Amino acid sequence: MVKDVDLIKDYYKSGEVAKMIGVSTRTIQNYCIHGLLSETFVNKRRLIPKDSLIDFLKNRNLYLETEKNRKDIIYARVSTHKQKNRGDLERQIQNIAQFAVTQNPKNLEIISEAGSGLNDTRKGITRLIKLVQEDKVSRVFINYKDRLTRFGFNYLQLICDFHKTEIVVVGTETEDKTMSEELAEDIISIIHSFSGKLYGLRKKVKEDICIELEKDTEE
């Protein structure tokens, strides 16, 4: 099955088409000779027009139209409910929406949430990634990169690139107050996390030492 979003060129070589549908290059050449595929020659090299390829794929039920089902997403996030309650989240959505409406959006949907950028199990980001993986998203509009995640943005970028989803960063300057607050909160979260792990490690070491001492005493 060939997705519409994967056909980004106007012309394709015989070998490229063969690889798409799992046949030999010679088979594609025979399709051209018998008129099943249109062809043109550039410097004696056979090229197949995109339109002819699409018709060929549709006739064999090998063409998957995803673009007509794809949508644009506005994703907005603040770290705390305090920020949400004072209107930071709503202002962020409005700022993104003002830009998005100038970009001819299609089936625009808003996903917003309050949660730390360090939390990779947030419901909003989980839903967004699921939609991207289902090839249902054309563009994701965000204020800044760290709205998606505090760390690991490049991994999300790779997922989006694979599914032909564009991440559009709307903001050009950070909101110093909000960003400073969130960064401080994230740092505190990291410290608490490591402190908890360190405490657990120390407790385990003490328990192991006690067990060894008891063994020595018994011996």
Image (cartoon, helix red, strand yellow):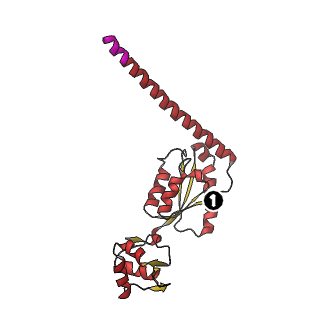
At x 49%, y 31%, the residue is 196
- Hey, what amino acid is under mark 1? Val
- Residue linked to disc 1: 170
The answer to whether 67 is drawn above or below residue 81 in the figure is below
Specify the quadrant that holds the N terminus. Answer: bottom left
At x 49%, y 47%, the residue is 120
Is 185 placed left or right of 69 in the picture? right
Instruction: State yes or no: residue 116 in magenta.
Output: no
Residues shaded magenta: 212-218
At x 51%, y 55%, the residue is 156
Q: Position of residue 130 (x, y in %)?
A: 44, 57
Residue 15 location, quadrant? bottom left
Is 131 placed left or right of 34 in the picture? right
Please identify the residue farthest to the bottom as the structure is shown. Answer: 34
Specify the quadrant that holds the C terminus. Answer: top left
Q: Main secondary structure of the magenta part?
A: helix
Q: Indicate the secondary structure of the residue bearing disc 1.
A: loop
